Image (tube, rainbow, N blue to C red):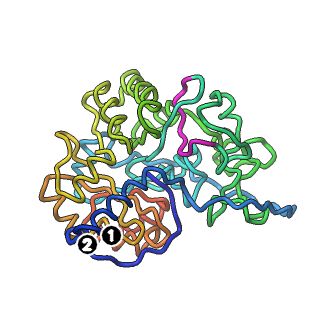
Amino acid sequence: MLGRMGRPVAPQPPLTSFTGRARGTALGALTALATLTLGAAACSSDDTSSATTTPKDSTTTVARPAASTVSALLALDRPIVLAHAGGDNTSPHDTPYGFNTSAALGVDALDMDVQLSSDGVLVVQHDATVDRTTEATGDVASMTYDQLHALDAGYWFTETCTCKDQPESAYLYRGVRTGAKPPPKGAEPDDFAITSFERIATDHPDFVLNVEIKGKAPAAIPAAAELARLTSTLHLTDRLVVTSFDDAVADAYSAAAPGVQITPGLGASTAYVLNGTLPPAGQKILQLPPSYENIEVVTPAMVAKTHADGLVLWVWPNDAEWETAEGYTKLLDMGVDGLNAADPGTAVKVVRARS
């Protein structure tokens, strides 16, 4: 569930041919995924241009998705499209606006990241700090929900990046949260805030939610416990796919929320990719990047192996090269079962054109 990195990826030999040093490099590359932050590194320069841009209007008519439970989603006879962080190439990351817009585009599921505020609210937020996406700085874990919710989560979003080196006119949604700029048609200022997981789950009751618990054990165990509590109280057992890069966090959630589909964590996923070790029983949805640091992870041979092993493979493209119609098509041609797309509108069009 990581965002766009904007790095070109050169073709590499398939993982099935890795031995010795190459296998070690692959393991290191996959391990490094756990510590990545989304997007390009923020630049320090701020443009002082006074030009303004009107936000794009939002589509408000949302069709019911083709499947509203994980079992029904897996039974579809076509690849699915998930909106990575609400479609973070086309909308501010992990915001209600992004989820609403992606739902209206016809995605099959919504992908998000969660962690706890200082007062124990499970918030939808990827980074451990608010620095990259809002006007403020500070750790998420040190702020109350009200403090987080007051921030402008669209502050640094542009059509090409979430970054700090663009002219003022490039920041389409800056100020919508605070009322300095009118919201797009069909949207509200609150749609550009850091919000709670409970809101997204209740705003989109017909959608499967793909949820990554951020952080590592033991610090992230309380977030796993809170997600398990909400799974029960909101009756989400058949609507969630849950993962964490830390297997211990995923295992803690699974123990507290039996029946929810768990994606293997970093350790189990790496063991499968490198050694063919099957994930724990019941963990049938793999979520992998196509490649990382010039190492090919998803190949036709890997896709064929996952299917032969009775597994499902969802891919988060995670790179500018893959987050295009051509990139999505290449992945679908390999036979992947799902695209966790940062540009969900394009992904939906590509999948529909093949149906």
The residue that appears at 43% across and 51% down in the rendered structure is: 1
Kindly identify which residue carries mark 2.
14
Kindly identify which residue carries mark 1.
296
Q: Nearer the viewer, residue 262 or 118?
A: 118
The x, y position of residue 343, in whole percent, is 49, 62
Q: The magenta stretch spans which residues?
A: 120-129
Task: Report, in whole angstroms, how far the alpha carbon at label 1 lies from the one at label 2.
Answer: 6 Å
Residue closest to the far bottom: 11
SS under mark 1: strand
Which image quadrant is residue 57 in? Answer: bottom right
What predominant SS class does the magenta segment belong to?
Answer: loop
Residue closest to the far front: 21
State left or right for residue 27 relative to residue 158: left
Question: Quick one: label 1 or label 2, which is nearer the N terminus?
Answer: 2
Neighbour tally class for label 1: few under 14, some 14-19, many 20 plus, Cα within 10 Å? some
SS under mark 2: loop
State left or right for residue 320 relative to residue 163: left
Which image quadrant is residue 236 in? Answer: top left
Q: Which mark is residue 255?
A: none
Task: Identify whether 147 is placed above or below 161.
Answer: above
Magenta run includes residue 155: no
The residue that appears at 59% across and 55% down in the rendered structure is: 91
The quadrant of the image that shows the C terminus is: bottom left
Q: Amino acid at mark 2?
A: Pro
The x, y position of residue 326, in whole percent, is 41, 76
**Do labels 1 and 2 touch, CB within 8 Å?**
yes
Q: Amino acid at mark 1?
A: Glu
The x, y position of residue 183, in whole percent, is 71, 48
The x, y position of residue 70, in whole percent, is 28, 42
Q: Nearer the viewer, residue 128 or 300?
A: 128
Residue closest to the far left: 308
State left or right for residue 324 relative to residue 117: left
